[in-house]
Amino acid sequence: MTAPLRRSPLHDRHVALGAKLAPFGGWEMPLEYADGGVLKEHAAVREDVGVFDVSHLGKVTVRGPGAVAFLNRCLTNDLDRVTAGQAQYTLCCDEAKGGVVDDLIAYRHADHEVLLVPNAANTTEVAARLRAAAPAGIDVVNQHQEYAVLAVQGPRSARALAALDLPTGHDYMSFATATRGGAAVIVCRTGYTGEHGYELVVPNALAGEIWDQLRTAGVRPCGLGARDTLRTEMGYPLHGQDMSPTISPVEARLGWAVGWKKPEFWGRAALVAEKEAGPLRTLWGLEAVDRAIPRPGMLVLSQGFPAGQVTSGTFSPTRKVGIGLALLEHPAGSPEGTEVEVDVRGRRARMKVVKPPFVPARVRDRT
């Protein structure tokens, strides 16, 4: 029997706005809204400000003496590179083969407390793996349904949050805590759009109030459809498509999120061996030359021979062209700048191999 879909604490507000809802990672989430649609929502984030309900994202707290040291023996990135009040992108990899079980953000509150934000569908698995490995005194608490997450993204995001008297002056990949109604609201300078933005981790009871205040401040609601076009323009990989238990960090160009000098983390031996030997395939960007849109699963051909597969693809609202990501084999060296063909429903469409992003990143911009 299929488990019922979980719902965000903002579900009723999405319905009232005429949102198109769909299953996503075990949750029923808005894809787009009746008064916007993907193109308008995408433009709002690139040019102004939008808010996404991403409450489906996981929330796992790891606490106890030596919590940071414990996580550093499990996750790929080096948590000692950041201090209290900073966040870090990292990976949970399979210990034997090095494939990506999930990618997540780690928020370092203190040496004894770290908040992890994994993907919705993988939260239970990540928490279970950590709980099984945790020594005595380390607690791994799955708080998936206790908090909402609102992503406020775009060049006007700081002004929108300032209107709510929330902190905005901190640096990229850091966070500050505010108090609202006696409860803590974590304001993280992070996001998945490539724009200056913030992600708010708020108790469920406060989610509706903050959503309404953002709406009053003129922030446009945006769905997961626009989130996907925005992240694809940046070349940000999506778990389950561009990385997975069968696609390693080396193949997915995520070696920068691996602490290679650390003596221990899950999957280290396999990943070091792969890095030294060189991957057989690598994630690249595709930009359509012909009128076509690459889609996940489509075959990529080079000089008429199979050369890989599209993992993500969409129409770029900013560039007005089809773009995508693809795992490409490259025995003859780097394919950057070469032309390949993608089998688009039986028709071969020409595309150029490029290195993302497809549009400039502005995550570090000051507003």
Image (cartoon, helix red, strand yellow):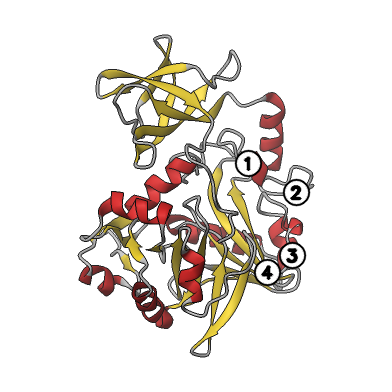
Please identify the residue farthest to the top as the structure is shown: 303
Of the residues under marks 1 and 4, which one precedes in the sequence? Answer: 4
- Kindly identify which residue carries mark 1: 96
Element type at mark 2: loop
Judge the density around disc 1: few (<14), some (14-19), many (≥20) Cα neighbours within 10 Å. Answer: few
Q: Are marks 3 and 4 in contact (CB under 8 Å)?
A: yes
Q: What residue type is labelled 3?
A: Thr
Disc 4 target residue: 85
In this rendering, would 3 be left or right of 191? left
| Residue 85, placed above or below residue 21 | below
Determine crowd level at label 4: few under 14, some 14-19, many 20+ residues with C-alpha closer than 10 A.
some
Is residue 240 among what the camera can see? Answer: no
| Quadrant position of the C terminus in the picture | bottom right
Q: Which mark is residue 83?
A: 3
In this figure, which residue is indicated by the disc labeled 2? 264
- Where, by quadrant of the figure, is residue 186 drawn? bottom right
| Contact, mark 1 vs mark 4 (Cβ under 8 Å) | no
Along the polypeptide, which appears first: circle 4 or circle 2?
4
Mark 3 vs mark 2: give the one in front.
3
Residue 28 place in picture, x, y as percent: 30, 62
Q: Do the residues labelled 4 and 2 touch (CB within 8 Å)?
A: no
The local secondary structure at tag 4 comes to loop
Name the residue located 47 percent from the left edge and 37 percent from the top edge.
Answer: 358
Q: Residue 239: percent from the left, percent from the top?
A: 47, 46
